Image (cartoon, rainbow, N blue to C red):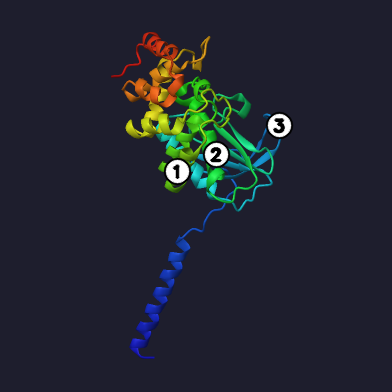
Amino acid sequence: MNLNRYILLAAFFVMALTISCSKQRVAPPFKTNVEKAGAPPKTWKEHWFEHDRVVDRVYYDDNVAFYYDTNVDKSVTWPFKAMSDVWSYCKKTYGSFGDSTRLYVIFHQGIYGGGHPASYFDASHDYRNTLDCGLGNWTTPTGEQIGLPIHEIGHIICGASHNSQGAPSDVIWGDSKFMEIFNYDVLMNIGREDEAQKVYQQMVDKDPYEEYPGRRYPGVRWFINWFYPIYTKYGKGEVLNRYFAVLANNYPKVGNVYTRNKDMNLGEFVHFWSGATGENQKEQAKFAFGAYWTPTIEAEFNQAQSDFPKVTYK
């Protein structure tokens, strides 16, 4: 055997040994069934209203924990990122909600239709920021399927932002009017401008005399003549947040709970929104509320300036 052949064989041996050692130094993936510290529970037994199901955790990240009942198609995964993005935006815009780490989302299919929220103040839902929604299916991230959960999150914002429990404004705007601008803003900020534009068009076409829970001012075009003008002129999501900050800093509370022996009136409502925008919104209110802006409401507005003098504006 000649010298060149010996050299070639030696080189081959060294290369093989090097590759073998290199492979041995790479540890195989370590698999474990141990849960990460702080992981949400794998199951949750419902114990509110008529709900009594055990729901299973199907996803979680730093923003959300998702639970499906046995009827929900487990191949439906679009809500995970969508609601994670929504809650991330809400924390960025409206601040903390308790520990604020996760929103707990429960989806039902074919049972418990509609939705309801709970906040970290509520023992009924184990002190978790929660939305519990039921539809016929959850297959596409459009229309009611994405709009309903965002709507329910809006109730958490109304009832628990700025470390304050309660929703004193509900007596003015009812169940759904704030949610219209809230849904629009959220959709615009999670990359769903397409759905936001659908919301806008729905509001343009909406019958202002339509019944809804807590309706107080039939005929008022809340989105078009009140919220949207304020939203576009004074900072969009930031001005919505400032309204709740004004309430938290000025509306009567006992501890963290909004407490008063009478409801908020329309004059006070406009006063607080004026504080949120930094400008007097009386003229916008006269335009939006029309015949409802009576001398009595004008007097309420003037009285609100005396009753809540720390709310200032031009």
Q: Is residue 37 visible?
A: no
Where residue 149 is drawn, which disc sits there? Answer: 2
Quadrant of the snapshot with the C terminus? top left
The mark lying in front, picked from 1 and 2, is 1
State the residue at coordinates (52%, 29%). 156
The structure residue drawn at horizontal position 53% and vertical position 41%, both measured from the top left corner, is: 147
Q: Position of residue 260 (x, y in %)?
A: 51, 11
Q: Earlier in the sequence, mark 3 or mark 2?
A: 3
Q: CA distance from mark 1 to mark 3?
A: 33 Å
Give the distance between the C-alpha atoms of the residues marked 3 and 2, in whole angstroms: 19 Å
User: Residue tagged by mark 3?
Assistant: 50
Mark 1 or 2 closer to N-term? 2
Residue holding disc 1: 196
Q: Amino acid at mark 3?
A: Glu
Q: Secondary structure at mark 3?
A: loop
Q: Tell me: 83 left or right of 112.
A: left
Classify mark 1: residues with Cα within 10 Å, few (<14), some (14-19) or many (20+): many
Residue shown at 40%/78% (left/top)?
Answer: 12
Task: Please state the horizontal and vertical placement of residue 262, each as a whole percent of the image.
Answer: 52, 11
Residue 5 picture location, percent across and down: 37, 87
Query: Could you classify mark 2 by the number of other residues whose Cα lies within 10 Å: few (under 14), some (14-19), or many (20 or more)?
Result: many
